[in-house]
Image (cartoon, grey):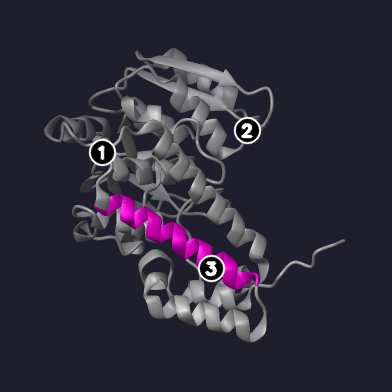
Amino acid sequence: MPEQLESIARQTQPPSELIVCDDGSKDGTIALITEFSRKVTFRVRLFCNGRNLGPAKNFEQAIGLCEGEIIFLCDQDDVWEPCKIRNMLEVFTSHPDGYYAFSDAQTIDQSGKLLNQTLWAALNLRAADFIGSKQLERLLKSNVITGAGLAFRSSLREIVLPIPPGWMHDECIGLLGSVISDGILVSEPLYKYRRHSAQVIGFRKSGLFQALLDSLASNNETSRRKLLAFRSLLERLNGTCKSGTISAERMNLLKQKEFHLLQRAIARSERGVNRFSKVFAEARSGRYGRFSNSSWSILRDLTSFKLLERD
């Protein structure tokens, strides 16, 4: 955290304020923030939670407390490039209809050593993936937006907050922002993304063995929760967006994603041949490739177990 704070203090265009919500830390964060606030010219507001909220709800609280027009998220111990705030604000000025923007990052290890690829390269993200409705379709397949690279207009809070159940803050902001508008890609790496084993959230590569372990740890209840979480997002859109705000094309994508999650939940509730036939039918439709992680998701649906129900 000290390195991240110093990178914020070194911004060529300093922030108007820094909101810090401490979620019950035991590592001296409060003392560190208090000392930091004495050394900078911008306002630092520290809030200590009476009980642990978890990452999503803690970010929700911090977002709600921000008073500026453009909100930047700080995520764990990543390091900002000195021009990050200035360059991102210029992006919003040149794209007045964009609700959010996110940048690429250089990846570093725990000690701060540069790794051999950018974050977008690691996530197989290309600018061509975010043209028009392709943007929403890419995010419906998997989240590629990290909170550390994200900035958004405060007006987006009317739709995003409170974070719907089952969602992380960055995924929710990016997805909802892409439904009602277009996100802005900033290909310049504007921060250093630290990869380490203790990350609560963020990018993580999984091999075949880890995928099999994840499959065995998953079950029909997991699939049902994903379906309910997605439906909660649809309910939010229906309750907050005026008629005609969402294009027919993007609404159709949302409905197809919901149907795909429903078919996966139904398949996981079956056993043996019945499960195989339902997974195979969904695979033939092309929706696994379009809305899930293709072969990995098929594997997970075939190998997850069904919870035994008690009388």
Q: Amino acid at mark 3?
A: Arg
Decide which of 220, 119 is in the foreground and name it: 220
Q: Which residue is mark 1?
A: 244
Between residues 125 and 154, which one lies in front from this camera angle?
154
Magenta highlight range? 249-269
Counting residues from the N terminus, which is met first, the one under dot 3 or under dot 1?
1
129 relative to 243, above or below? below
Q: Are marks 3 and 2 in contact (CB under 8 Å)?
A: no
Magenta-colored segment: predominant secondary structure: helix
Residue underneath mark 3: 264
Q: Residue furthest left?
A: 94
Label 3, label 1: how many angstroms apart (C-alpha)?
30 Å
The amino acid beneath tag 2 is: Leu
Give percent across and percent down for residue 156: 34, 30
Magenta stretch contains residue 252: yes
Q: Give the mark nearest the N terminus, 2 or 1.
A: 2
Q: For residue 180, what is the image quadrant?
A: top left
Q: Which residue is mark 2?
A: 53
What's under tag 1, amino acid-wise? Answer: Gly
Q: Can residue 176 be seen in the rendering of this structure?
A: yes
* Image quadrant in which the C terminus is located: bottom right
Q: Is residue 296 magenta?
A: no
Residue 134: quarter of image: bottom left
Q: Position of residue 147 (x, y in %)?
A: 41, 42
Badge 1 density bin: few <14, some 14–19, many ≥20, Cα 10 Å = few
User: Could you tell me if the residues under marks 2 and 1 are in contact, i.e. CB atoms within 8 Å?
Assistant: no
The label nearer to you, 3 versus 2, is 3
